[in-house]
Image: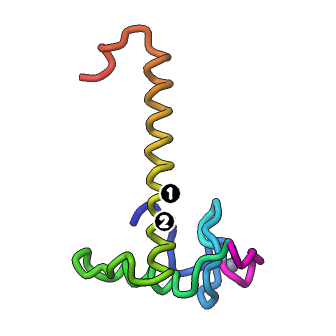
Amino acid sequence: MGLLPNSRVCGHCGRGDTPFVILGERGWCCSACTPADKSETLPGGTKEYLNKIRTVRAEETPDSDESNASRAVTQLLRGRLLNEIGNLKSYDILFRIGSPMPGNIHS
Ligand SMILES: [Zn+2]
C-alpha cells in the first residue's frame, strides 16, 4: 500500500473527521476543503475501507468487488501502479538512448 498516501487525515487541511472526496497531487482531499463534482468524488466509505485494508493481514483483505469504495480504491491503486511503471519505462528508454555503448550498461 505504499503507493497511496496516509489515509487517516486529509493531506490538504489535515482534518480527520471528514470523508475524502478525491485523491490529489499531494494526497487525499476531504469534503471540508475541497469542493468536488459529485461525478468525480470517491464513494462513501472509501476512507474506512482504506483504513481497514491497512490494518488487516493480507489474507484477510476484503474482496475487492465487495463495495463501491473498494472498487474505487482498487482503481486508484491500479492507476498509480501503471503510472509508476510508465515512468520507469520512459526513464529506461531515455537511459538507453543517452548511452553510446548499449550492452555495457547492465551486468
Ligand atoms: Zn481537507
**For the magenta stretch, what is the residue range?**
30-39
Circle 2 residue: 75
Crowd rating for badge 1 (residues with CA inside 10 Å; few <14, some 14–19, many 20+): few
Find out whether the residues at labels 1 and 2 contact each other: C-beta distance under 8 Å: yes
Q: Residue at the far right: name it.
A: 35
User: What's the residue at 30%, 14% (across, down)?
Assistant: 103
User: In terms of image quadrants, where is residue 106?
Assistant: top left
User: What's the residue at 43%, 20% (across, down)?
Assistant: 96
Q: Secondary structure at mark 2?
A: helix
Could you tell me residue 100's position as x and y percent?
A: 43, 8
Prevalent SS, magenta region: loop
Residue 8 position (above or below residue 77): below
Residue 28 position (above or below residue 89): below
The quarter of the image holding the C terminus is top left
User: What's the residue at 46%, 23% (across, down)?
Assistant: 95
Question: Which mark, by number, is residue 79?
Answer: 1
Could you tell me residue 104's position as x and y percent?
A: 30, 14
